[in-house]
Structures are given as C-alpha cells and as structure tokens.
Amino acid sequence: MKKLRKPYVSIFLILLMISSCTKDTVVNDFSNRKFDYTIYETYKANPINFKDTYSSKDSNSEISINILNYVNEQYDSNLTIPGEFHEFLNSSNENFQEFLVESNYIDSEKFLRLTKLKDEIYLLGFDQALENYELVINELSLSQIDFQTENLFLNTMKQLNDTGVFEISQAKSGSCASAIIVFAAATASLALCATGFLCGLAAIGYISAAQNWMEACTEPV
C-alpha cells in the first residue's frame, strides 16, 4: 500500500518554498537603494582653500601629493593614493585613462558606463545624466561596498559640476571630460578607508582641487 504524505507536511514545504523565494527577492532587489549626497553637501558648506598648497612650478604629480597630504591633514583622514597614480597625472589625458583601466583601477565595463555618462552630460544635461546613471547602477545588483564606491563617485561628480568644469571642457574633443570623470571614479574606488565619512570628504577635496591637472581641459581652444 502506497504511503500518503501528511497534508501539513506538504503545506509546510510550500510555505518554505514561498519564504525562500521571498527572501531571495528581498536580498537581490537593489533597485530601491537610495543614493546619499551628504558628503557632497557637507563639503559644499565648508570647502577647502587650496591656494597655498602648491606652486605653479610644481609638476602634476607633486601637486597631487601636496593636495592629498593637505586634505588628510584638514580632515584627519587616511586617504591613500598609490605613487604610480600620482606619477601618471603627468601624462596625457588619453594615457592616464589607459593606465587606470590597465591597472584595474577602472574595469572595462565601468569605463563604458563612464563614457556614456560623459556623453549624456552634454546631450541631456548634468542632472538628467546623473539620474540615468543612478538607475543603471541600481540595475547592476552591486555589493554594498561597490555601491558605496559609486555613491561616493556621484558625490564627487556633483562637486566637479559645481566648478563648471564640464561646461568649459565641452568645447574640447571630449577626452578631457572623460579623463576628469575617470579620474574621479578611480579616486572614489580608493577612498573607502578606515576613516569612513572623513575619507569621503578628503576624496572630494582632492578631486576638486586637482585644477592644475585639469588646466589642459580648461585652457581656451
């Protein structure tokens, strides 16, 4: 005689399956994660004056090191930038971007996303381009750490936009704006250090103050 399974066992199994599916849905649903711009707002309210931190005779790498030391001192943070990163700031925009990708500071897929972001800034305006980028990131189901990196990157983008650098570099071939955006994204990826929020402030200050490196973009055509 065939043994029948007790009804409550079947009900329990069905409920377990539903619970598991629901749990997976919650864990994997990243579409509603919110971007937080507190770091940008904090820096905007109290920006750093970098006027006396470097000389016009300094190389880009020297300026980069001086600025990094200064922001870490101001925020009591421990943002660290590799030496090779500083050195490649002396190279052309195109070579610097190649270095960041080849050295895995930026992977090839992210580089394509950043290129699209740059294009949309000029086609759709900064605010719409940023909103579109947020939607793209939320569709990627990133880890919390990777999401925090993207969140910091967009905080730095808001600060860069306040400087007017994208309006100025629009007259260029496009490599300039691409270099600035990739530079900001790579720096953000290095900024998840022990001092947390302060490290994020240091990153925004460091990126915003890299005006000497950006002069290749801001000089008249």
Image: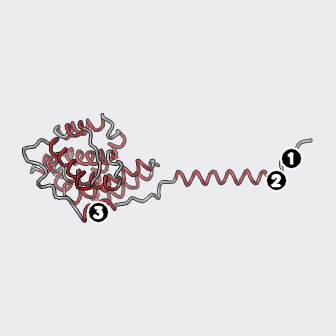
Question: Which residue is found at the position 28% from the left and 44% from the top?
Answer: 80
User: Closer to us: mark 1 or mark 3?
Assistant: 3
Q: Which mark sits nearer the N-terminus, 1 or 3?
A: 1
Q: Quadrant of the N terminus?
A: top right
Residue 4, label in figure: 1
Estimate how packed mark 2 is, as few (under 14), some (14 to 19) or many (20 or more) residues with alpha carbons within 10 Å. few
Amino acid type, residue under disc 2 in the picture? Pro
Question: Which residue is found at the position 26% from the left and 39% from the top?
Answer: 82
From the top left corner, tell me how far across and down residue 67 is, in percent.
19, 49
Residue 7, label in figure: 2
The answer to whether residue 95 is above or below residue 48 is: above
Q: Give residue 15's quadrant in the image.
A: bottom right
From the top left corner, tell me how far across and down residue 157 is, in percent.
28, 55
Direction right: furthest residue: 1
Mark 3: secondary structure = helix
The answer to whether residue 212 is above or below residue 46 is: above
Camera-side residue of 70 and 58:
70
**Residue 12 as seen in the image, left or right of residue 98:** right
Task: Kindly check if marks 1 and 3 are in contact, taking CB atoms under 8 A apart as contact.
Answer: no
Estimate how packed mark 3 is, as few (under 14), some (14 to 19) or many (20 or more) residues with alpha carbons within 10 Å. few
Direction bottom: furthest residue: 45
**Residue 174 as seen in the image, left or right of residue 139:** left
From the top left corner, tell me how far across and down residue 214 is, in percent.
16, 48
Q: Which residue is mark 3?
A: 42
Mark 1: secondary structure = loop
Mark 2: secondary structure = helix
Question: Which residue is found at the position 82% from the left and 53% from the top?
Answer: 7
Amino acid type, residue under disc 1 in the picture? Leu
The answer to whether residue 45 is above or below residue 113 is: below
Between the C-alphas of marks 2 and 3, the distance is 60 Å
From the top left corner, tell me how far across and down residue 186 is, in percent.
30, 44
